Amino acid sequence: MLGVEGLSISFGGLAALSALSFEVAEREIFALIGPNGAGKSTVFNVVTGLYRPSAGRVRFRGQDLLRLPPHRIARRGIARTFQNTEVFRQLSALDNVLIGRHAHLRGGLVRGALGLPSVWREEAGARAVARALLERVGLAEVAGVEAGSLPLGSQKRLEIARALAAEPRLLLLDEPAGGLNPTETQAVMELIRRLRDEGGLTVLVVEHDMELVMGISDRVLVLNYGRRIASGSPREIAADPAVIEAYLGSEEA
Ligand SMILES: Nc1ncnc2c1ncn2[C@@H]1O[C@H](COP(=O)(O)OP(=O)(O)OP(=O)(O)O)[C@@H](O)[C@H]1O
Ligand SMILES: [Mg+2]
């Protein structure tokens, strides 16, 4: 589904990623973990076309992505959420999902937000799809509620619904449980699992919450200073000395 090969990128002399390679199979839940600044979000930014690497390749379903602008990558079937929750706070949950759909059809989240025509807004088909997506993430009851007034756990799931509106095959989730309490984290875990099991999605997830990572991932890749230090099943990773060292090291710092 996704193939990353020899990816390198630097910011002002600092190597954020160094010759990173990995592959994600169809319908896999693949976790990318590592200490703060390890390069996890940078991987997402390269794959979605926001950053251009200095070396390496990214292939999605056999096709090269690197020369494509972000909206064309999105249209190929890759959607993402961001590390910092970014719902449109004053819009209803339903309108947040409609914007995701609009961005998918027209390209560009900002353009989608600014140019939302009232005619289209009333379009019954789009609203039905958006409602179905809210239902899928467990937010049907709050469709009309201002997104900014929802608890963080619901906002995180709303962001996922908005990403799903683009009808992706590959979903990139950057810290979907960031800042959530254990109950909310559990709901997000179940949602991710269902998206794969019932929706057939492939999921690449960045997360610090080890319960989520160990609980839902098929495979885990551990980054430190932009390099892979380990990869394998959750069980293999948990027992890996290099991983334990990287995490203890980062806690001491
Ligand atoms: N646009 C940018 N400009 C300058 N430096 C950047 C930029 N994006 C990332 N970096 C740097 O690249 C390194 C990796 O950052 P990245 O955001 O990928 O880390 P991360 O693994 O997602 O960390 P966290 O767990 O804190 O989110 C960091 O040193 C960061 O400061
Ligand atoms: Mg990050």
Image (cartoon, rainbow, N blue to C red):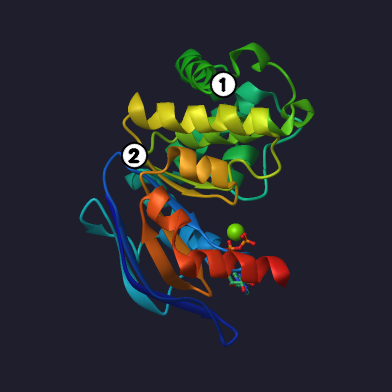
> Is 29 situated left or right of 165 in this image?
left
Q: Nearer the viewer, residue 79 or 137?
A: 137
Q: Amino acid at mark 2?
A: Arg
Q: Nearer the viewer, residue 102 or 80?
A: 80
Mark identifier at residue 169: 2
Tell me the residue at 30%/39% (across/down): 27
Please provide percent x and percent y for residue 45.
Answer: 50, 61
Q: Quadrant of the C terminus?
A: bottom right
User: Against 5, is 169 above or below?
Assistant: above
Check if mark 1's residue and mark 2's residue have beta carbons within 8 Å. Answer: no
Q: Residue furthest right?
A: 149
Q: Is residue 38 visible?
A: no
Q: Sequence-wise, which precedes: disc 1 or disc 2?
A: 1
Q: Nearer the viewer, residue 245 or 219?
A: 245
Count of all numbered marks drawn on residues in the image: 2
User: Against 62, is 53 above or below?
Assistant: below
Residue pointed to by mark 1: 119
Q: Residue furthest bottom?
A: 13
Q: Quadrant of residue 114?
A: top right
Tell me the residue at 31%/31% (across/down): 200
Q: Quadrant of residue 117?
A: top right
Q: Amino acid at mark 1?
A: Val
At mark 2, the secondary structure is loop
> Is 12 situated left or right of 56 in this image?
right
Please provide percent x and percent y for residue 127.
Answer: 52, 17
What is the C-alpha distance between the residues marked 1 and 2?
A: 29 Å
Mark identifier at residue 66: none
